[in-house]
Amino acid sequence: MAKGLGLLGTGLKTKEQALKGLGQAAADEARTDAMQEQLDAQMKAAEMSQMATLTAAGGAVGAYAGAKAGAIGGPWGAVIGAAAGFLFSKIF
């Protein structure tokens, strides 16, 4: 028995334990939400980094290929390559 109060004491102890459990569950939920927000931010940063890398690589390849082939000049090749790199970043 809880401190000699019989059934009432047991009920109060159960209520206290339940409230403590709810507090712990709320703290766990807040921690989970914060971690999910961090993961989402990291995913967005990785996507932006990939997009920038593929766009830059596409621009460089386009400029080089355009300059070597002579069909489309370097700047236009860079623009076309950058656009292709950007689109590939959205696909992958």
Image (cartoon, rainbow, N blue to C red):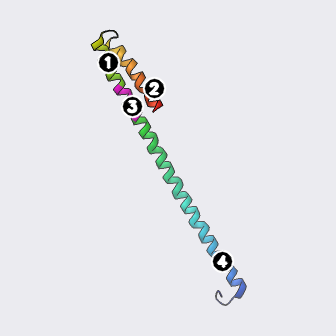
> Which mark identifies residue 63?
1
User: What segment carries the magenta color?
Assistant: 50-57
Q: Position of residue 12 (x, y in %)?
A: 68, 79
Q: Earlier in the sequence, mark 3 or mark 1?
A: 3
* Amino acid carrying mark 1 in the image: Ala
Q: Earlier in the sequence, mark 1 or mark 2?
A: 1
Label 2 residue SS: helix
Q: Check if mark 1's residue and mark 4's residue have beta carbons within 8 Å.
A: no
Q: Position of residue 48 (x, y in %)?
A: 43, 35
| Residue named by callout 3 | 52
Label 1 residue SS: helix
Question: 47 and 16: which one is in front?
Answer: 47
Above or below, comparing residue 85 to residue 66 in the picture? below
Crowding at mark 4 (Cα within 10 Å: few <14, some 14-19, many 20+): few
Q: Residue at x 61, y 67 (%)?
A: 22
Q: Earlier in the sequence, mark 2 or mark 3?
A: 3
Residue lying furthest right: 7
Q: Earlier in the sequence, mark 4 or mark 2?
A: 4
Separation of disc 1 and disc 2 at Cα?
Answer: 17 Å
| Residue named by callout 4 | 14
* Amino acid carrying mark 3 in the image: Ala
| Residue named by callout 2 | 87
Label 4 residue SS: helix
Q: Residue at x 56, y 66 (%)?
A: 24
